[in-house]
């Protein structure tokens, strides 16, 4: 099974600035997927970005990008040009087999 | 994109009664669906894997007789909380995907309150 650790319970960023959320994981698998999900106050889980372990290139989705360090088992999320709508809980998740294992989450506050 | 619908969004029930929550994949077939439970300000905890046409697989510590899962078709999984008690009050979320590697789509969740 894969364990996922998010060591930042809360983070704060000013609007238009950049913030990085940390995530580390542990797995014995060679093939796996990593995800970042966003959960706003509505509690709807929204997929932000995904990374395939065998791809060395870091995934990017508009203002969201990851820094995937496979050897270090690190998978951080960078949010550029932060917007008020980015305020939410962010969960890092790993998938081996079919089930997702989530980290404890990071609450992101965006200040004007 | 893949759409997962979950109903009801909120339910209040009396202690001792049973509550059924539905999870539907609207535009794809799902042989596997997942049920999670989330406590306030906490992460999602996987409860069980729902398998179409066969028994669900429950995570350690989850009472299968309390949380009955039925996956009778390729688009519908149901979670029934039987003989509900106040400690069963929680947020329950389902998820599914036509291509798991592309990421899972989640239902909008069900807030269960047992009084």
Image (tube, rainbow, N blue to C red):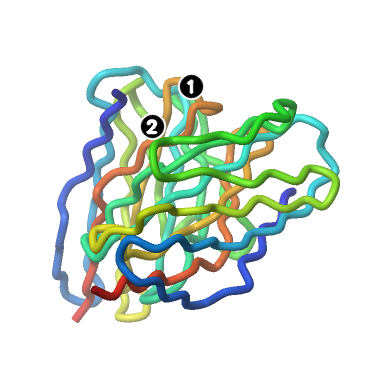
Q: Secondary structure at mark 2?
A: strand
Label 2 vs 1, first from the N-terminus? 2
| Left or right, residue B7 beside residue A70 | left
Q: How many marks?
A: 2
Q: Secondary structure at mark 1?
A: loop
Residue A68, picture quadrant: top right
Q: Is residue B96 above or below residue B20?
A: above
- Asked whether A48 or B107 is in front, the reply is A48
Residue at (39, 63) in percent of width and height = A17
Label 2 to label 1: alpha-carbon separation: 18 Å
Please report, as a chain letter, where disc 1 is located.
B
Q: Is residue B5 above or below residue A41?
A: above
| Image x and y of residue A98, in percent | 59, 34
Using the rendered image of the protein, determine whether residue A67 is visible from the camera's viewpoint: yes
Please report, as a chain letter, where disc 2 is located.
B
Using the rendered image of the protein, determine whether residue B18 is visible from the camera's viewpoint: no
Residue at (75, 46) in percent of width and height = A69
- Asked whether B30 or A21 is in front, the reply is A21
| Image x and y of residue A36, in percent | 50, 48
Q: Which residue is mark 2?
A: B71
Residue B30, picture quadrant: top left
Residue at (26, 30) in percent of width and height = B3
Q: Nearer the viewer, mark 2 or mark 1?
A: 1
Q: Which residue is mark 1?
A: B99
Question: Local crowd at mark 1 within 10 Å, few (<14), some, or many (≥20)?
Answer: few
| Image x and y of residue A30, in percent | 82, 33
| Left or right, residue B106 beside residue B54 | left
């Amino acid at each position: 099974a894969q364990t996922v650790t998010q060591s930042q319970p809360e983070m704060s960023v000013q609007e238009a600035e950049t913030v990085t959320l940390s995530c580390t994981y542990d797995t014995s698998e060679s093939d796996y997927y990593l995800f970042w999900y966003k959960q706003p106050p509505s509690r709807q889980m929204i997929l932000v970005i995904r990374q395939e372990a065998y791809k060395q290139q870091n995934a990017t989705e508009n203002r969201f990008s990851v820094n995937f360090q496979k050897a270090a088992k690190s998978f951080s999320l960078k949010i550029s040009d932060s917007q008020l709508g980015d305020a939410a809980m962010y969960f890092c998740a790993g998938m081996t087999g079919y089930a997702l294992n989530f980290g404890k989450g990071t609450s992101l506050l965006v200040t004007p | 994109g893949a759409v997962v619908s979950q109903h009801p969004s909120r339910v209040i029930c009396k202690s001792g009664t049973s509550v059924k929550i539905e999870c539907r994949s609207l535009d794809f077939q799902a042989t596997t669906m997942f049920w999670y439970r989330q406590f306030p300000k906490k992460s999602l905890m996987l409860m069980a894997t729902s398998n179409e046409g066969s028994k669900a697989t429950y995570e350690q510590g989850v009472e299968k007789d309390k949380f009955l899962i039925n996956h009778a078709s390729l688009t519908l999984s149901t979670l029934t909380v039987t003989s509900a008690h106040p400690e069963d009050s929680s947020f329950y979320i389902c998820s599914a995907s036509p291509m798991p590697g592309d990421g899972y789509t989640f239902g909008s969740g069900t807030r269960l309150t047992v009084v």
